[in-house]
Amino acid sequence: MDAEPIETARLTLLPLAVEHAAEMAEALDDPALHEFTGGSPSTAGELRDRYARMIAGPAGGDDLWLNWVIRVTETGRLAGYVQATVTSGRAWVAWVVGTPWQGRGVATEAATAMVAWLRERGVRSFAAAVHPAHTASAAVARRAGLTPTPATEDGETIWESAP
């Protein structure tokens, strides 16, 4: 399975390319995006290197790394990304949307479109790790069909879908 473009009412999810690095560095250039995950904004060069590794995929094993950038149709601008690591019919999913696009349903629309696309291709269950204080990300997880579990990993609540 390879990432393909996914169209929604307001967005296009484009398979990640190294050429997206400069615009993504700009879209994600806000230290507040790292409040729950740690770290700091990446430079375009750092993203180019990271994207090249991500596109190459994991070394060995049965995992698939699927990554998309989110393009807002109305403006043509990149607003963030969604990603999935698929193993044996289960996908760990994640999303990040730049500060200017938050609160507009972009993360929800992108995450639910990605989950639907993966389901159509046989993925049976989904999981995400969400910081317990990150209410916006919890809302995205819920709208994508996930529910919180008692499990935690690195201080984050594990959210899962029913198979």
Image (cartoon, grey):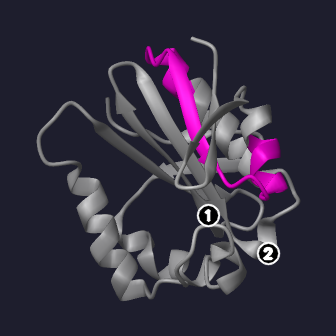
| Label 2 Cα neighbours within 10 Å, binned few <14 / some 14-19 / many ≥20 | few
> Disc 1 or 2, which lies upstream in sequence?
1
Residue 56: x %, y % from top left: 20, 54
Quadrant (top left/top right/bottom left/bottom right) for the C terminus: top right
Is residue 60 depicted above or below 28 in this figure?
A: above
Residue furthest out toward the right: 103
What is the secondary structure assignment of the residue under circle 1? strand
Residue 78 in the image, given as x and y percentages of width and height: 61, 67
Q: Nearer the viewer, residue 158 or 65?
A: 158
The reply to whether the C-beta atoms of the residues labelled 1 and 2 are less than 8 Å apart is: no
Query: Could you tell me which secondary element the residue under label 2 belongs to?
Result: helix
User: In front: 58, or 26?
Assistant: 58
Cα separation, mark 1 vs mark 2, equals 10 Å
Q: Which residues are magenta?
A: 117-140
Q: Residue at x 54, y 84 (%)?
A: 40
Asked if residue 121 is among those painted magenta in the image, a careful observer would answer: yes
Q: Can you give x and y, in whole percent of width and height, for residue 4 in the image?
A: 43, 39
**Residue 61 vs residue 149, the one in the foreground:** 149
On the image, which quarter does residue 122 sit in?
top left
Q: Is residue 10 visible?
A: no
Q: Which residue is mark 1?
A: 80
Within-10-Å neighbours for mark 1: few <14, some 14–19, many 20+: many
Mark 2 — residue? 100
Task: Give the x, y percent position of residue 133.
Answer: 79, 58
Amino acid, disc 2: Pro
Q: Name the quadrant containing residue 97.
A: bottom right
> How many numbered circles are shown?
2
Any part of residue 2 in sight = yes
**Residue appearing at x 33%, y 76% in the figure:** 48
Q: Would residue 65 appear left or right of 37 to someone viewing this image? A: left
Q: Is residue 101 above or below residue 131?
A: below
